[in-house]
Image: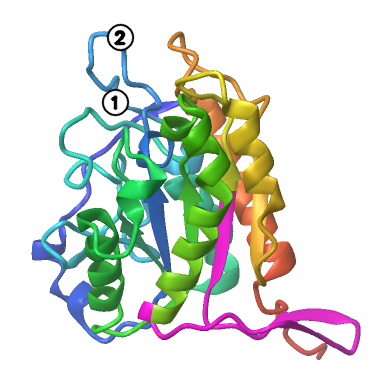
Amino acid sequence: MEMETPIPSSKQNPEMESSQTKQIFILSGQSNMAGRGGVTKHHKWDGVVPQECQPNPTAILRFSAKRHWEAAREPLHSDIDTKKVCGVGPGMSFANAVRERVGVVGLVPCAVGGTAIKEWARGKHLYESMVMRAKESVKGGGEIMGLLWYQGESDTSHQHDAEAYQGNMEKLISNVREDLGLPSLPIIQEEGIRVARLAAYWHLVAIASGDGKYMEKVREAQFKISLPNVVCIDAKGLPLKEDNLHLTTEAQVKLGHMLADAYLTNFAPPQILPPHP
């Protein structure tokens, strides 16, 4: 692992605000998406950035809280999830793993720690902010390719919340697709190659921990979601910090790679190789 090195901000790189084509991914949910990797029990981030999460100022960009593009760097959610200390999440390892295939990656952080699914309902502040940021992110050029979602720990304390999770999650996915004007279309088989004919896909992470005794019920609900172009990635078994709630830095890197593998396998366009001479 390496300590993070300074990189130029978007104010020093105005070309980032140009009509640069970006493949945009929304990062949303609660604390394990916002990132707590490397955050100590004294609520300080250790500043350690793994090689897999290192910045690439020309290929990986971040949509800031002030709604402008800048070079992405850890912690991605530092100006979004402002009530907690943020550290390493899965976003940068995901972006580094897919950038050679998709080109310039634009990340739109929206996750906020400690939030329940009902707080992401249409009309609530978190939902409306996420949709607004997603809409703003494409104005400078780019296309929303998908949403990475990791949330559910806050719905494990009460049976009612756990039992309502599947319905709430399916409604959230449908609302986001409707409000962004990005309906999900079926995956079509073309000459033996899976081609995703869709405006956006949704990756849901099945939780690895929880605040209460209904964790398995929430996980069961997550795996039952069967909407088109929704893939569930299982985080269970990834290393947890001492609090038994948040993923370690190592686990966040692994999760980012798991998300990238699922995207490249299920949704990314086939890689075009140069013709033989």
Instruction: Classify mark 2: helix, strand or loop.
Output: loop
Q: Nearer the viewer, residue 183 or 195?
A: 183
- Residue beneath the point at 57% across and 25% down: 214
- Residue beneath the point at 49% across and 36% down: 160
**Residue 36 forms part of the magenta stretch:** no
Q: Are marks 2 and 1 in contact (CB under 8 Å)?
A: no
- Determine if residue 119 is in view: yes
**Residue 66 locus on image (x, y percent):** 11, 61
- Which residue is at the far front? 160
Q: CA distance from mark 2 to mark 1?
A: 14 Å
Residue under label 2:
41
Picture layout, residue 133 above or below residue 112? below
Residue under label 1:
47
Name the image quarter holding residue 4: top left
Give residue 149's mark: none
Q: Is residue 96 left or right of residue 258?
A: left
The three-letter code of the residue at mark 1 reads Gly
**Residue 56 locus on image (x, y percent):** 38, 55
Q: Quadrant of the C terminus?
A: bottom right
Residue range highlighted in magenta: 179-204
Q: Residues within 10 Å of mark 2 (few under 14, many from 20)?
A: few
Q: Earlier in the sequence, mark 2 or mark 1?
A: 2
Q: Nearer the viewer, residue 16 or 151?
A: 151
Instruction: Classify mark 1: helix, strand or loop.
Output: loop
Between disc 2 and disc 1, the foreground one is 2
Picture layout, residue 142 above or below residue 154? below
**Residue 233 locus on image (x, y percent):** 66, 46
